[in-house]
């Protein structure tokens, strides 16, 4: 007996409330103390220090966790709907590694030392280049072509990043590259937020425009075409939106994996397995999950703060294996 989905508006309201609560908690915890310490600073007359702690350290971190998580969740849901593959995630189109390569080039050449925003800017350029290649292929091949192109781009970019690490003459530069690739929202500023936000908003808009065609596509390509859905336009919207949004997030935060894989699976039964409805739900769910992971690394007594991408991988990798075993068991039945 299948469980009836929650009313859609109620589900979105609950997820939005969860995001609000986690956002409030994110603003209260971390280096510098909790609300009591912040109030003590204000009582001592250290309003500037309190504002720096809240407005310049925790606010950008919270906003980036929210935006990147939302983008990854929505992109994962859209790609799973487009490819009709429950194991698809934003990494399947190669945009994560291409954005990472752009940032690695900025670190390797030392440009980021002279101009700090060169790192996210070059990451965005890498993501846009990958998006352009994939969009060109979207009109000339099928789904298999897109997947193969994404694998090829990802493999090439990973090889070039490994080459940069291998040839790096400075061990400190190599270490900086490795730490950045682990993914984090720590030590980011409002400049990073303002740089990535417009591109993430554009990517989210493109993905939402594909909601109805994705619903039709779930019935099969021929049925979708008979209902008036353009497969070429849908592929362009999903691939372009995922590439632009996820690329911008990767450019400012590094590689953060598995959010786009885990969140749609958790929420799909709650929206009645409807791809279009899953987009907004996955955006809110992704934001909540990434903020929760970021809060977790701040309160864990590890001595050294863990990287956010490491934590999401530790959560997502076992979940991914469980999905594979479940799919295998269903196939055998």
Image (cartoon, rainbow, N blue to C red):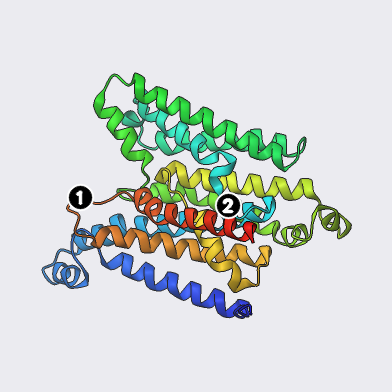
Answer with mark 2 or mark 1, whichever residue precedes in sequence: 2
Q: Is residue 123 above or below residue 290?
A: above
The answer to whether one can see residue 71 in this image is no
Q: Secondary structure at mark 2?
A: loop
Q: Circle 1: is it few (<14), some (14-19), or many (20+) Cα within 10 Å?
A: few
At horizontal 35% and vertical 25% (from top left) the residue drawn is 165
Q: Position of residue 107 (x, y in %)?
A: 36, 29
Q: Position of residue 80 (x, y in %)?
A: 63, 54
What numbered label is drawn on residue 87?
A: 2
User: Which one is in front, 29 or 112?
Assistant: 29
Disc number lying in front (2 or 1): 2
Q: Position of residue 44 (x, y in %)?
A: 10, 68
User: Which one is in front, 84 or 298?
Assistant: 84
Q: Which quarter of the rendering shows the N terminus?
A: bottom right
Displayed quadrant of residue 299: bottom left
Q: Is residue 80 above or below residue 273?
A: above
Return the residue found at the far right: 226
Displayed quadrant of residue 173: top left
Q: Which residue is mark 1?
A: 304
Horizontal arrangement in the rendering, residue 43 relative to residue 176 (left or right): left
Horizontal arrangement in the rendering, residue 27 relative to residue 260 (left or right): left
User: Which one is in front, 319 or 7?
Assistant: 319
Horizontal arrangement in the rendering, residue 119 relative to residue 296 (left or right): right
Q: Which quarter of the rendering shows the C terminus?
A: bottom right
Q: Is residue 162 above or below residue 294?
A: above
In three-dimensional space, the C-alpha distance between marks 2 and 1, rounded to whole angstroms, equals 33 Å
Q: Position of residue 180 (x, y in %)?
A: 35, 39
The answer to whether one can see residue 317 in this image is yes
Q: Secondary structure at mark 1?
A: loop
């Amino acid at each position: 007996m299948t469980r009836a989905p929650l009313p859609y508006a109620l589900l979105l309201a609950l997820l939005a409330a969860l995001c609000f609560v986690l956002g409030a908690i994110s603003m209260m915890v971390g280096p510098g103390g909790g609300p009591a310490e912040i109030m003590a600073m204000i009582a001592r007359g250290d309003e500037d220090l309190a504002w720096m702690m809240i407005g310049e350290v925790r606010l950008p971190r919270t906003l980036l966790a929210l935006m990147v998580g939302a983008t990854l969740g929505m992109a994962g849901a859209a790609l799973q709907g487009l490819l009709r593959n429950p194991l698809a995630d934003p990494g399947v189109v190669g945009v994560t590694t291409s954005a990472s390569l752009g940032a690695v080039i900025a670190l390797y050449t030392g440009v980021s030392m002279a101009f700090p925003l060169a790192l996210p800017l070059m990451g965005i350029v890498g993501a846009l280049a990958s998006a352009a290649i994939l969009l060109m292929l979207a009109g000339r091949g099928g789904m298999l072509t897109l997947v193969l192109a994404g694998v090829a781009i990802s493999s090439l970019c990973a090889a070039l990043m490994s080459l940069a690490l291998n040839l790096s003459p400075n061990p400190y530069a190599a270490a900086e590259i490795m730490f950045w690739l682990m993914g984090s929202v720590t030590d980011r500023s409002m400049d990073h937020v303002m740089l990535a936000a417009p591109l993430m908003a554009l990517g989210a808009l493109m993905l939402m425009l594909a909601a109805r065609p994705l619903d039709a596509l779930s019935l099969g390509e021929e049925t979708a075409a008979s209902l008036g859905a353009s497969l070429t336009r849908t592929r362009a919207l999903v691939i372009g939106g995922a590439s632009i949004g996820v690329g911008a997030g990767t450019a400012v935060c590094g590689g953060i994996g598995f959010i786009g894989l885990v969140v749609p699976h958790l929420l799909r039964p709650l929206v009645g397995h409807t791809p279009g409805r899953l987009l907004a739900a996955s955006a809110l769910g992704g934001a909540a999950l990434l903020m929760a992971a970021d809060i977790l690394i701040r309160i864990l007594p590890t001595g050294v703060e863990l990287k956010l991408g490491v934590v999401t991988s530790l959560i997502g990798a076992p979940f991914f294996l469980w999905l594979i075993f479940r799919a295998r068991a269903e196939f055998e039945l």
